[in-house]
Image: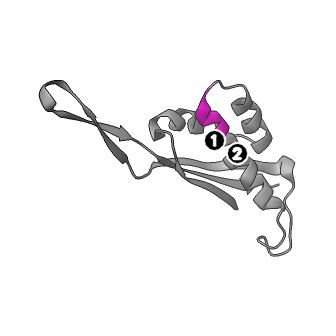
Amino acid sequence: MFKATHRLARISPRKVRPLADLVRGKLADEALDILRYQPHRGARLLEDVIKSAIGNSQDSEQNEGRTANQGALFVSEARVDGGPIIKRFRPRARGSAFPILKRTCHIHVTLEELQG
């Protein structure tokens, strides 16, 4: 099991979750191909996290001296959690203030090797 995480990504989790649903359960190479042709900014972020997880699978120190076959890796978990919200205020009519919520998210990806 090989993991990678992007914490505090400056994008709303609502925009990244549909992309995570697209790649969950797919082979890692296939998931990268799917994301490469998506026009969304969240696809670039998710693509980078998957590439990082693939890189972690090749790191022999982390994996007790063994390296994984890159073609046999699949996305077993793609999770997008909400992060802290940055709060800003804008002036509105008659001296009132209107809150602007700048949402962040944590993107978690777990790759596993195919058995058999």
Is 83 magenta? The answer is no
x%, y% of residue 25? 66, 42
Q: Residue at x 78, y 50 (%)?
A: 73
**Above or below for 5 versus 88:** below
On the image, the x and y values in percent for residue 31 come to 72, 37
Where disc 2 sits, the SS reads helix
Residue 25 visible in the picture? no
Against 8, residue 61 (above or below) is below
Q: Residues within 10 Å of mark 2 (few under 14, many from 20)?
A: some
Can you name the residue that lies furthest to the front here?
Answer: 95
The quadrant of the rendering that contains the N terminus is bottom right
Instruction: Residue type at mark 2: give it.
Output: Asp
Q: Is residue 104 left or right of residue 45?
A: left
**Residue drawn at the location 78% of the way across and 70% of the way down:** 63
Q: Nearer the viewer, residue 6 or 33?
A: 6
**Residue beneath label 2, please?**
48
The answer to whether the residues at label 2 and label 1 have Cβ atoms under 8 Å apart is: yes
Question: Where's residue 113, x and y in %?
Answer: 77, 55
- The residue located at (81%, 73%) in the rendering is 61
The reply to whether residue 100 is in sight is yes
Horizontal side of 59 relative to 84 (left or right) equals: right
User: Which label was assigned to residue 45?
Assistant: 1
The part of the chain drawn in magenta is: 40-44
Q: Main secondary structure of the magenta part?
A: helix
Q: Nearer the viewer, residue 50 or 66?
A: 50
Instruction: Say which residue appears at 82% left-offset and 65% top-offset.
Output: 59
Q: Position of residue 110 (x, y in %)?
A: 65, 54
